[in-house]
Image (cartoon, rainbow, N blue to C red):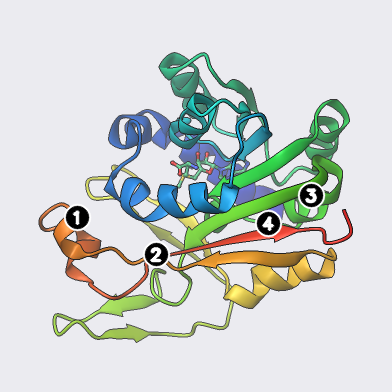
């Protein structure tokens, strides 16, 4: 399938899934609250007056948390349904509909605003193409800015990973890019498109931009602190997410 067609299909899925996703996530589900937000907030290292972009903000759960700490926050997402839900939930964040695979829209954003922090949480694996966003970071970021992203861990949390009842995992073909359809949350009414990429695929594009990594987290949480019977509560010692921070060293 052509790149534009895949992106159009992704967009349609997130328009259709938006209301259900918002109701399911609210201010963060257990996965956000236990694994993702603490690691992201640690790497964001906010002092309070930064201008922050939440790229792929969904219903704004993370954007609202950051805004509460005093930063000026912009949230962008290509799902008009999710942007509508995000606006209903709070007026503290400046929301805008935007496609992060579109170079023109990214450069228009960079012409109007630059950012001390760009955070992209659990979005890149849902994007058909990460090049335009990664290649726009230099334009979008202020000097001494940083880019923080979280993704489902490509080694342990991808459609190619199968968990055995013994607690062992089998992984089929880690190294190749693969597009699949899956439901990532229990009860999810429709499948989303996900794009498995090995870690080097993300890191090499950022390294090619001249960026360096200054923070890396693979969160693991004591299962006793997770809801009973939750998927990741039964997978103790395996990190379901990878979070990293990148900067332009000369800036
Ligand atoms: C798994 S949700 C995560 C949302 C939010 N960051 C969170 O953690 O709850 C993925 C989000 O990425 C957005 N998204 C996917 N592809 C996108 C694109 N090309 N441009 C902008 N947003 C995109 C979807 O609309 C959806 O809100």
Where does the image place residue 251, in percent across and percent down from the top left?
87, 53
Give the alpha-carbon distance from disc 1 to disc 2, as whole Å: 13 Å
Q: CA distance from mark 2 to mark 3?
A: 25 Å
Which mark is first along the chain, 4 or 3?
A: 4
Q: Are marks 4 and 2 in contact (CB under 8 Å)?
A: no
- Crowd band around label 1 with a 10 angstrom C-alpha radius: few (<14), some (14–19), many (20+): some
Q: Which disc number belongs to residue 62?
A: none
Q: Secondary structure at mark 2?
A: loop
Can you identify the residue that label 4 sits on?
Answer: 129
- Residue at image mark 3: 137
**Residue 234 at x, y percent in the picture:** 17, 68
- Residue ID at (81%, 48%): 136
Is ligand 1 within 8 Å of the beta carbon of the residue shown at mark 1? no
Of callouts 2 and 3, which one flags the residue occurring earlier in the amino acid sequence?
A: 3
Reading the image, the residue beneath label 2 is 219
- Nearest to N terminus: mark 1 or mark 4: 4
Foreground: disc 3 or disc 4 = 3
Mark 4 vs ligand 1: CB below 8 Å = yes
Say which residue label 1 marks.
226
* Badge nearest the viewer, 4 or 2: 2
Give the CA separation, mark 4 to mark 2.
Answer: 26 Å
Quadrant showing the N terminus: bottom right
The quadrant holding residue 118 is: top right
Name the side, left or right, on which 72 lies relative to 138. left
Task: Look at 75% across and 47% down and name the residue there.
Answer: 145
Q: Nearer the viewer, mark 1 or mark 4?
A: 1
Tell me which label, 1 or 2, sits earlier in the chain.
Answer: 2
> Label 3's element?
helix
Looking at the image, is mark 4 or mark 2 earlier in the sequence?
4
Q: Is residue 158 visible?
A: yes
Circle 4 Cα neighbour tier, 10 Å, few/some/many (<14 / 14–19 / ≥20) = some
Q: Measure the C-alpha gap from mark 1 to mark 4.
A: 33 Å
């Amino acid at each position: 399938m052509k790149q534009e067609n895949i992106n159009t299909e992704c967009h349609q899925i997130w328009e259709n899934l938006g209301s259900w996703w918002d109701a399911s996530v609210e201010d963060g589900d257990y996965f956000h609250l236990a694994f993702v937000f603490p690691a992201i907030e640690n790497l964001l290292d906010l002092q309070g007056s930064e201008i922050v972009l939440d790229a792929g903000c969904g219903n704004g759960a993370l954007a609202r948390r950051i805004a509460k700490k005093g930063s000026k926050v912009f949230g962008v997402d290509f799902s008009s349904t999710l942007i509508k839900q995000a606006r209903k939930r709070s007026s503290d964040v400046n929301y805008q509909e935007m496609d992060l695979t579109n170079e023109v829209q990214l450069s228009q954003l960079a012409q109007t605003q630059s950012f001390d922090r760009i955070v992209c949480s659990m979005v890149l694996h849902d994007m058909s193409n990460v090049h335009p966003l990664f290649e726009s970071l230099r334009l979008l970021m202020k000097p001494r800015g940083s880019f923080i992203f979280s993704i489902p861990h490509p080694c342990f949390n991808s459609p190619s990973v199968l968990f055995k009842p013994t607690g062992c995992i089998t992984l089929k073909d880690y190294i190749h890019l693969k597009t699949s359809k899956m439901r990532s949350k229990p009860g999810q009414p429709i499948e989303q498109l996900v794009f498995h990429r090995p870690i080097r695929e993300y890191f090499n594009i950022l390294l090619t931009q001249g960026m360096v990594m200054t923070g890396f987290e693979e969160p693991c949480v004591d299962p006793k602190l997770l809801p009973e019977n939750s998927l990741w509560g039964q997978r103790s010692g395996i990190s379901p997410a990878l979070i990293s921070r990148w900067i332009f060293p000369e800036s």
